[in-house]
Image (cartoon, grey):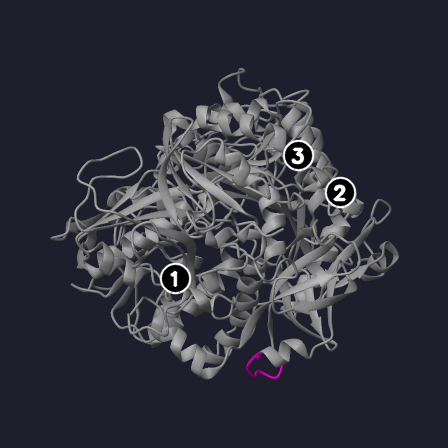
């Protein structure tokens, strides 16, 4: 029986040849199934007696001719989704599994549940999972799910990592997750076999634990079956039937299998690694890649019993307690891609590549030295799926109505899946974030998925940016701004200005795979250096360079036009947008539960029979929609879905690639633009919330008097070919006024000072505009119906159970979100968004608070509290505000300074 130290020596003695430079990772994939046996330092692997599937028998039960929903895939997500569908009372729910339950990835997953992550959404999902597997399922079925609560221990070997853990500890208090920061000595007492000589500290979560994935799936399937759902094994899906309705909308019609077909209007793709293949059957792009992911199981270790599971993020290794042994695994920078995913692969494993796995062994031995002389009992190397942004793919696919995704869980399906399975049964969920130009691009999917794998254990810094898959979508001013020192951010493919560096260009270079696969890591990389400087939980070194208002750019543009456009606008938008042409309205779009799907501006257009670069030709009514660039695809998908559901006769046209936008904001904006635009910009001639077609330096533009930073200002929406000359004319006119470039970092700071909401942070599909202080965007006093109105009326009648509140902190400390909110000695919420307000010289934070007694959160409740915000375990006194702490009377937008 080989030891871990023996494995290290074998890996060093037989290095794998690197591929030739330029070929990249494509040479590192395995064949379609388990590879031939290699000389590895262990006696056996778990794949003995298993391997590729041979489905000799027919389906485990007869197929029904019809179903209300068919779930494809009998792994963790499929079983969870079926269980929640059945629990909600849906009849006619069927799960199809090509082999047996868990035969793909679930059967070999580690089953670790860590309750704390640097995402409030994921913490909520994990809390739900823990509740289901540790309590609910056993109470409902009488069956043990295999849950073992042995605790979890996060290792910090540097100061920044310990700071991150302290942030997690504070966030956990908002969700009732008990955790403790331990010193090295306290860690040694808890885990005597651990080497603590190189530690700064640890984070101990006593109620973390381990699930039995196969046992949990079996219990879920039995519980679902008891409620009338059907589980059919040994039934591979071979096709998805699609039909096109009278409005040209593609919809699911049924599922084809080797043993017959099922007529159904709804399919949920929970096929994991095989989800892309299922998607292709339906003409749906599923952006994920399959990779090898491995761990080894040790022989018995004396004294390891009852120890907590360990995550040593800096060593990129985890140690899972497995009885009286450990499973050792992690995430490497050079994972092996599984290029040709076989549909015959079931209960199979790959041979472990010891050279790739070596860093995990080294990290494990350093952390628990006894492992150096501990034998290896077995190896587990199986396929896992990873997505470009390290988030699961959930919700209805925009290409095909009735086709839902529940896949791409980045090796965390067992932990996140229970709540996600529930959310899939209660739309809306976020499955519409990638533009087709990205999902059609294999290189982008591959690079970004690799980076999401390689950085899985990296510190989640507030201002980090991806290096993979960059420069996919650039607007007309990209090169112009790059030369002026723009440091770009990336949001769903778009390169947008983050901030401006005074020392020259910092271009984003081609992805170097962090030096893996024989690639040469970039040297003297200006963009990489600037990012590295931002890797801190303190005020970043470029803190003061983002403070100024000036010229900004962004936003994406749609047109909603046609005979039913007004009906569609009345239904889609919470505010009254049926105003005269030339008006612009800030509004929300809601879902049927009253949650906020978007906030945007809607500008009424005059009918035109002649198309121009700034408006299509149309009959009926027309609206110009300006949305945030980072959420444009989500907006497009939401609007399209609503138009289809309501059968409105109108068009939605995406002009994002044809237009650019610059925003000139600040006290001198009127004086600057008066030299560039051929119109009177006075308050009387050009009021706030209006728009006009004007000429700027001879070029036709749409000027909109708006502000998302609380200053006097205008946006100029410009045809692509005119962007550079108009920009240069504005900069020339602004030179004597001190006009400077600014990016989204400035917008973030200025907007939070003014109390303007950001969708994805302050607003999400579970947040209503009433809770968020945006009741003024809802036409509740009019009789006009709109999507979400009934839910808002019910919420208003019952009283708000939570409310978004602004806080300021007197101490000059950086906050970024996830801080706990204390009221009168009790945690009542957490911060969603925080930034520094330069005008008031204070940190500003926004977060939703609730009443611990369960009652409504009235304005008096907000006023009467004594507040503090907890950052990294330290509380700072805070003041609550019912109005913006800066310019509450909106004088600056009127030009009154």
Element type at marker 3?
helix
Q: Is residue 54 above or below residue 165?
A: above
Residue at which label 1 appears = 424
Q: Residues within 10 Å of mark 3 (few under 14, many from 20)?
A: some
Asked whether the residues under the numbered discs 1 and 3 touch, taking CB atoms below 8 Å apart as contact, a structural biologist would say no
Residue 321 lies, in percent from the top left, at 67, 57
Residue 768 visible in the snapshot: no
Q: Find residue 531 and name its label.
A: 3
Residue appearing at x 72%, y 41% in the figure = 543
Which mark identifies residue 314?
A: none
Any magenta on residue 669?
Answer: no
Q: Quadrant of residue 534?
A: top right
Our reading of the magenta stretch's main secondary structure is: loop
Q: Position of residue 579 (x, y in %)?
A: 31, 58
The stretch of residues the image draws in magenta is: 852-858
Identify the mark nearer the N-term, 1 or 2.
2
In the rendered image, the vertical position of residue 36 relative to residue 745, given as above or below: above
Task: Tell me the residue that label 2 is attached to.
Answer: 365
Residue 860 lies left or right of residue 791; in this view the side is right
Residue 107 location (% of width, % of height): 47, 54
Alpha carbon distance from label 3 to label 2: 32 Å
Task: Indicate which label's residue lies in the foreground, 1 or 2.
Answer: 1
Of helix, strand and loop, which one carries label 2?
Answer: helix
């Amino acid at each position: 029986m080989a030891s871990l130290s023996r494995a290290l020596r074998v890996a060093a003695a037989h290095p794998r040849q690197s591929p030739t430079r330029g070929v990249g990772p494509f040479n590192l994939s395995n064949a379609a199934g388990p590879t031939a046996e290699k000389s590895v330092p262990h006696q056996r692997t778990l794949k003995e007696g298993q391997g590729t599937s041979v489905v000799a028998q027919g389906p485990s039960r007869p197929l029904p001719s019809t179903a209300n929903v068919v779930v494809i895939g009998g792994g963790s997500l499929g079983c969870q989704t079926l269980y929640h569908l059945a629990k909600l009372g849906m009849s006619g729910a069927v799960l199809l599994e090509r082999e047996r339950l868990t035969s793909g990835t679930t059967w070999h997953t580690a089953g670790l549940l860590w309750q704390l992550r640097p995402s409030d959404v994921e913490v909520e999902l994990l809390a739900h999972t823990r509740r289901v597997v540790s309590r609910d399922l056993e109470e409902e079925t009488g069956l043990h799910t295999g849950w073992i609560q042995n605790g979890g221990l996060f290792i910090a070997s540097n100061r920044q990592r310990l700071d991150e853990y302290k942030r997690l500890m504070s966030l956990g208090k908002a969700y009732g997750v008990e955790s403790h920061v331990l010193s090295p000595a306290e860690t040694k007492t808890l885990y005597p076999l651990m080497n603590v000589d190189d530690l700064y500290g640890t984070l101990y979560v006593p109620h973390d634990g381990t699930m039995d994935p196969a046992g949990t799936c079996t219990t879920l399937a039995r519980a679902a079956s008891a409620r009338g759902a059907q589980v059919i094994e040994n039934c591979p899906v071979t096709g998805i039937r699609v039909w096109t309705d009278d409005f040209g909308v593609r919809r699911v019609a049924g599922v084809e299998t080797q043993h017959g077909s099922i007529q159904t209007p709804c399919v949920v793709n929970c096929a994991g690694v095989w989800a892309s293949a299922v998607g292709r059957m339906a003409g749906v792009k599923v952006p994920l890649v399959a990779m090898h992911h491995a761990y080894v199981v040790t022989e018995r270790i004396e004294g390891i019993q009852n120890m907590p599971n360990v995550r040593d993020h800096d060593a990129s290794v985890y140690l899972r307690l497995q009885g009286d042994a450990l499973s050792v695994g992690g995430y490497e920078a050079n994972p092996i891609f599984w290029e040709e995913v076989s549909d015959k692969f079931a209960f199979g494993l790959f041979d472990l590549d010891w050279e790739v796995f070596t860093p995990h062994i080294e990290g494990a031995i350093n952390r628990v030295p006894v492992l150096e002389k501990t034998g290896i009992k077995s190896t587990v190397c199986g396929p896992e799926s990873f997505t470009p942004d390290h988030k699961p793919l959930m919700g209805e696919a925009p290409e095909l109505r009735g086709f839902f995704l529940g896949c791409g869980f980045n090796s965390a399906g067992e932990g996140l899946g229970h709540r996600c399975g529930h959310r899939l049964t209660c739309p809306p969920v976020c499955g519409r974030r990638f533009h087709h130009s990205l999902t059609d691009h294999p290189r982008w999917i591959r690079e970004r998925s690799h980076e999401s794998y390689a950085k899985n254990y990296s510190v989640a810094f507030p201002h980090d940016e991806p290096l993979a898959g960059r420069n996919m979508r650039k607007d007309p001013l990209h090169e112009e701004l790059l030369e002026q020192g723009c440091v770009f951010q990336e949001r769903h493919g778009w390169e947008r200005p983050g901030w401006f560096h005074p020392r020259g260009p910092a271009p984003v270079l081609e992805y170097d795979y962090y030096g893996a696969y024989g690639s040469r890591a970039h040297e003297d990389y200006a963009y990489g250096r600037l990012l590295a400087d931002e890797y801190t939980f303190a005020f970043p070194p470029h803190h003061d360079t983002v403070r100024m208002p000036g010229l900004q750019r962004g936003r994406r543009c749609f047109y909603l036009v046609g005979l039913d456009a007004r009906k569609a606008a009345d239904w889609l938008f919470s505010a009254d947008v049926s105003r005269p042409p030339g008006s612009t309205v800030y509004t929300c779009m809601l879902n049927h539960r009253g949650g906020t799907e978007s906030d945007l501006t809607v500008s009424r257009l005059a009918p035109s029979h002649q198309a121009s670069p700034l408006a299509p030709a149309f009959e009926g009514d027309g609206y110009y929609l300006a949305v945030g660039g980072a959420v444009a695809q989500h907006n497009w998908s939401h609007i399209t879905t609503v138009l289809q559901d309501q059968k409105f006769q109108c068009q939605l046209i995406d002009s994002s690639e044809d237009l650019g936008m610059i925003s000139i904001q600040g006290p001198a904006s009127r004086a600057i633009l008066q030299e560039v635009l051929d119109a009177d910009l006075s308050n009387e001639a050009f009021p706030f919330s209006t728009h006009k077609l004007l000429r700027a330096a001879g070029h036709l533009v749409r000027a909109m008097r708006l502000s998302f930073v609380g200053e006097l200002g205008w946006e100029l929406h410009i045809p692509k070919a005119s962007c550079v000359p108009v920009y240069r004319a504005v900069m020339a006119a602004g030179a004597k006024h001190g006009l400077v470039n600014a990016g989204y970092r400035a917008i973030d700071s200025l907007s939070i000072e003014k109390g303007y909401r950001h969708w994805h942070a302050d607003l999400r599909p579970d947040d209503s505009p009433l809770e968020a202080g945006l009741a003024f965007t809802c036409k509740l006093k009019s009789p006009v119906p709109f999507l979400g109105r009934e839910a808002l009326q019910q919420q208003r009648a019952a009283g708000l159970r939570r409310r978004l509140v602004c806080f300021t902190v007197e101490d000059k400390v950086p906050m970024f979100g996830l801080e706990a909110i204390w009221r009168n000695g009790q945690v009542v919420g957490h911060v969603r968004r925080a930034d520094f307000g330069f005008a008031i010289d204070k940190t500003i934070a926004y977060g939703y608070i609730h009443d611990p007694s369960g009652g409504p959160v009235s304005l008096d409740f907000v006023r009467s509290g004594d507040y503090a915000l907890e950052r990294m375990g330290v509380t700072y006194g805070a003041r609550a505000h019912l109005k913006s702490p800066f310019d509450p009377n909106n004088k600056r937008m009127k030009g009154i300074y």
